[in-house]
């Protein structure tokens, strides 16, 4: 069984709780879909915890921006500021480790439908970490790339949108599964997103991860509570949070929703 996590974004409390929940499962491998750093205040701690867990990882756009492999053009101001803040606080070993993460990984297990891991999308040859699979058109392009992938994999795990999703293509029809699980059917292809560990963009602040069981042919989403207030207090102390403290409470919710909509671009 494979545990899939994504978009940790330097949230140590969320990552600790998620890995503790994963340890309670019969997991053979942990797969991280990138954006290990960015936005929050514990980049070094998250990197160490991931490395100690033995997780295999791909690079996200925030990871590559911190290492200078891409620029922050197109990042919102808060995201760009967090990239600079993070870069100044990571040691050479952590930066080197981030810079060596691949953009795509093929994971194959005997008797399984096979899985390709990416941060953003599978279909572009370059810049795949920046593509958001948030439209039918983009998902169609990634389904086409998955169907022709040389590995023969039938599942592509992606992150970047911070939104849980299970999409199935069967013959020419694509459907989005409702709920938190799906059966992996012979002859179908799947795009699956575990959501986010450390950067929620909805009213549900819990971390989420996904379990893929090749033997049972199932995909299942799990959610984990953690000390959100503690994590955000550290983010605010580091100067990395949106400044809403002077805004009256009735107006904070709408402002947060607008802010998250804007931030969703990165």
Image (cartoon, helix red, strand yellow):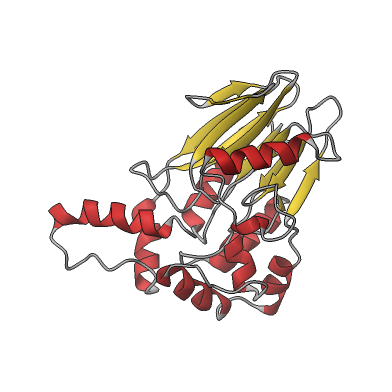
Which residue is depicted at the point 38% across and 52% down? Answer: 228
- Label count reads 0
Q: Is residue 22 visible?
A: no
Query: Residue at the bottom extreme?
Result: 88
Q: Residue 53, position in %: x, y?
A: 68, 51
Q: Nearer the viewer, residue 249 or 168?
A: 168
Q: Residue 255, position in %: x, y?
A: 24, 57
Q: Nearer the viewer, residue 27 or 252?
A: 252
Q: Is residue 177 visible?
A: yes
Q: Nearer the viewer, residue 256 or 52?
A: 256
Side of 263 relative to 3 (left or right):
left
Which residue is depicted at the point 37% across and 45% down? Answer: 202
> Which quadrant of the view contains residue 102?
bottom right
Q: Residue 128, position in %: x, y?
A: 67, 55
Q: Nearer the viewer, residue 85 or 103?
A: 103
Side of 197 relative to 96 (left or right):
left
Q: Is residue 191 above or below residue 14?
A: above
Which residue is depicted at the point 13% across and 60% down? Answer: 248
Q: Is residue 212 above or below residue 243?
A: above
Which residue is depicted at the point 30% across and 55% down? Answer: 258
Can you say which quadrant of the picture contains the N terminus? Answer: top right
Q: Is residue 72 above or below residue 32?
A: below
Side of 62 relative to 126 (left or right):
left
């Amino acid at each position: 069984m494979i545990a899939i996590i994504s978009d940790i974004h330097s949230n140590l409390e969320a990552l600790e709780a998620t890995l503790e929940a994963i340890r309670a499962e019969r997991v053979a491998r942990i797969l991280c879909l990138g954006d290990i750093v960015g936005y929050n205040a514990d980049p070094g701690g998250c990197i160490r915890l991931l490395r100690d867990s033995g997780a295999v990882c791909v690079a996200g756009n925030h990871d590559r921006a911190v290492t200078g492999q891409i620029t922050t053009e197109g990042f919102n101001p808060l995201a760009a500021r967090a990239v600079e803040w993070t870069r100044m606080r990571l040691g050479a070993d952590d930066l080197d480790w981030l810079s060596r993460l691949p953009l795509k990984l093929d994971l194959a297990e005997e008797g399984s439908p096979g899985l390709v891991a990416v941060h953003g999308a599978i279909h572009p040859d370059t810049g795949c970490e920046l593509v958001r699979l948030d439209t039918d058109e983009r998902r169609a392009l990634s389904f086409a790339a998955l169907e022709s992938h040389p590995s023969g994999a039938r599942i592509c795990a992606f992150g970047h949108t911070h939104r849980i999703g299970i999409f199935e293509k069967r013959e020419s029809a694509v459907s989005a599964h409702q709920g938190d699980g799906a059966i992996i059917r012979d002859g179908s292809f799947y795009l699956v997103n575990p959501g986010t560990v450390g950067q929620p963009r909805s009213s549900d602040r819990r971390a989420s991860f996904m379990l893929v069981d090749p033997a049972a042919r199932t995909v299942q989403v799990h959610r984990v509570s953690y000390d959100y207030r503690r994590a955000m207090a550290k983010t605010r102390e580091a100067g990395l949070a949106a400044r809403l403290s002077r805004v009256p409470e009735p107006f904070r919710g709408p402002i947060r929703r607008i802010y998250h909509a804007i931030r969703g671009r990165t």
